[in-house]
Image (spheres, rainbow, N blue to C red):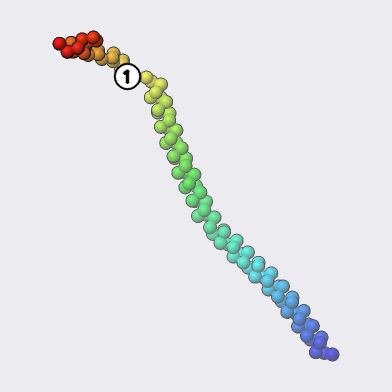
Amino acid sequence: MELPFVAVLLAVGLFLGWGVGTQYARAKRGWTDYKAAQRAVPGARRAAWLLVRAVTTKVGVIALLLVGAVAYAAAGPDQERAEPAPSPSPTASTKAGVKGR
């Protein structure tokens, strides 16, 4: 009579120990992951700000180039346009209706 009672107590103890052990392992793994994420945040934050700085710089340069191009186009030419060059006068051999003499 005593042996089945001990066997039941052993089975209940093993079951409870297994449940507590898995919960402890899960909590420990979560705590380790939390600490790893906490250590990674400053580096990730620094990288994010560097990317924002790079994008902002590129957008600023493009905006300055665009403003410069618009200002250059709005200012107009610095000198007057040259008149078209005179066309060459036709020679005797190229006059209409006159074939080589």
Residue 62 location, x and y as percent? 43, 35
Residue drawn at point x = 56 percent, y = 61 percent:
36
Any part of residue 89 in sight: no
Disc 1 marks which residue? 78
Residue 30 falls in which quadrant of the image? Answer: bottom right
Task: Say above or below: 89 vs 6.
Answer: above
Residue for point 68% across, 73% down? 21
Q: Nearer the viewer, residue 7 or 46?
A: 7
Q: Which residue is found at the position 31% from the left and 15% from the top?
A: 80
Residue 18 image offset from top left, x and y in percent: 70, 75
Name the kind of residue labelled 1 in the image. Answer: Asp
Q: In the figure, 84 relative to 28: above or below? A: above
Residue that protrudes farthest toward the right in the picture: 1
Regarding residue 29, the answer to whether it shows in the image is yes
- Residue 57 percent location from the top left of the image: 44, 40
Q: Residues within 10 Å of mark 1 (few under 14, many from 20)?
A: few
Q: Position of residue 89 (x, y in %)?
A: 21, 11
Query: Residue at point 42% right, 26% down?
Result: 70
